[in-house]
Amino acid sequence: LSYSKVNEKKFSAALQRSSAPSRFFSTNISYDHLAVGRPVCSEMVSSSDVVLLHCGLCLLKRFTEHVLAQVILSSLQYPSEFNIVTRSVISHFYLQHDMKSGSSCAEVVRSVLLASCDGSKTNLPDVNVFLDFEHAVPSESELQIYTFAEKILEQADVLLEDVKHYSAGASAEIRIAIQQPNNKDAQRGALDILSKLVMQIRAYYDLSQRIEQIIPLLLWDLCSGPLPPAEQLDTLQATCRQFARLIDFALSFDTVKMCTPALQNDFSFYRRAMSRESDGQFVIPLELANTISLFLACPTPMLSALITATTNFVASNGDLPVTNTTDTLATVVQVCRFMVEKEENWERLSDQNFSFTIRVMVGAIILYDHIDGTGAFCKDSPIDIRSVVELIKTQSRNEEAESLLSALRYTTKHLSDGSTPKSVRALFP
């Protein structure tokens, strides 16, 4: 990346005039190397890339009056400096458009152009509503449903802590029982411990069934009112709070569950023992054990319960337009994004509530994608997926960001549809 110092002052001035904030570049910039922290391009700039970059920058200049585009276009007349200047603009686009390290020059520019031309960028108005997820108090009309949901959420909090401490479960005892199949004491010892653990697992399943019962009641209040979605949510803040807490619980539980393989291993061993000993003393019937086994086989069982409850709500309320539900969920997404994007809201959000709001936003997108005919990722979607992904990456811890992006990638329904713009699919490599 070294280049001559002939135009050092000109290049320095061009960088200062560009719209790229200084944080896009390393603080240790020398004029022998442009220190951008990590390699962006995996290949030398070819002649076809030059043409593509030139065309792309012309379009950016024409339609957005992008200052950096004008700077780079003016620099193309200096071939000896083209490589370094190209790298600088690619570094800028890389950070703006979430390109992976190692992308080629052509891929970077194509991403920029696709985002501008394929309709995946939505300019939606902000929904200026702040939902008090921490302190919302139910009105008299909300009190009954709020109290019902609160009892379920109290149990959910207890069981979330319980599953966090499940750890290895009965893995050691099961290992001994498998190694010593003729040792009755080893077999009985494993089953005794498993009996207690199976009752815990049954409690998880029972909770998912209670969640499937409460979700339609909450959705009816949120979606069937006479007010526009934003006003309805603002009016029923306490009801929306309970709905959001259930979404947060589902995502949190499933994250722990996926990191706890002992849950499924323990239950599988217990169910096999039930099949072998039909006259044995077991804490649950075999039919229920088969149902719970299917529950555990799902990577995200609590989220699946939410999705099932939401789709059943739409299917069983034919008199209520589907758009009532989809518009409400889309508004929840927009409100959550507004709450965490706008600096004026930050003082009202604790760190815990900040992360909570982002998780609720992701959960609402997943639910929307399962009940809307075209989904959350098409170009006509009211949800700005690109802004959502950018928000997750910049405002969440690395581990949590990865978990939320995986949820959007693997638990949604329409991401892989042909109607999904390529630039949107590229956000989930």
Image (spheres, grey):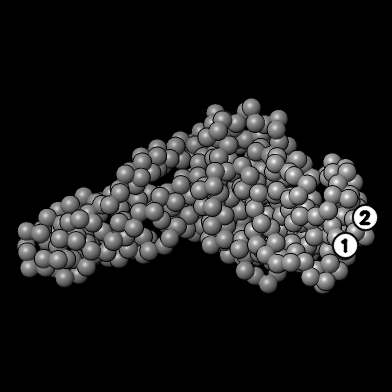
* Viewport quadrant of the C terminus: bottom right
Foreground label between 2 and 1: 1
Q: Is residue 157 left or right of residue 5?
A: left
Q: Where is 182 relative to 245, above or below?
A: below
Q: Residues within 10 Å of mark 1 (few under 14, many from 20)?
A: few
Q: Position of residue 112 (x, y in %)?
A: 78, 59
* Viewport quadrant of the N terminus: bottom right
For label 2, the SS is helix
Q: Is residue 230 left or right of residue 81?
A: left
Q: Position of residue 254 (x, y in %)?
A: 43, 52
Residue 317 appears in the picture as rendered:
no
Q: Where is 423 relative to 227, above or below?
A: below
Identify residue for label 2: 74
Residue 83 appears in the picture as rendered:
yes
Q: Which mark is residue 254?
A: none
Q: Is residue 18 left or right of residue 359?
A: right
Q: How many marks?
A: 2
Along the line of sight, which residue is nearer the eye, 371 or 85?
85
Q: Residues within 10 Å of mark 2 (few under 14, many from 20)?
A: few
Q: Position of residue 323 (x, y in %)?
A: 68, 56
Q: Residue at x 39, y 54 (%)?
A: 259
For label 1, the SS is helix
Q: Tell me which amino acid carries mark 1.
A: Pro
Q: Do residues under tags 2 and 1 come within 8 Å of each other at their CB atoms?
A: no
Q: Tell me which amino acid carries mark 2.
A: Ser
Label 2 vs 1, first from the N-terminus: 2
- The Cα atoms of the two marked residues, 2 and 1, are separated by 11 Å
Q: Which mark is residue 79?
A: 1
Q: Residue at x 11, y 68 (%)?
A: 181
Q: Residue at x 53, y 56 (%)?
A: 407
Q: Residue at x 62, y 28 (%)?
A: 348
Along the line of sight, which residue is nearer the eye, 66 or 2?
2
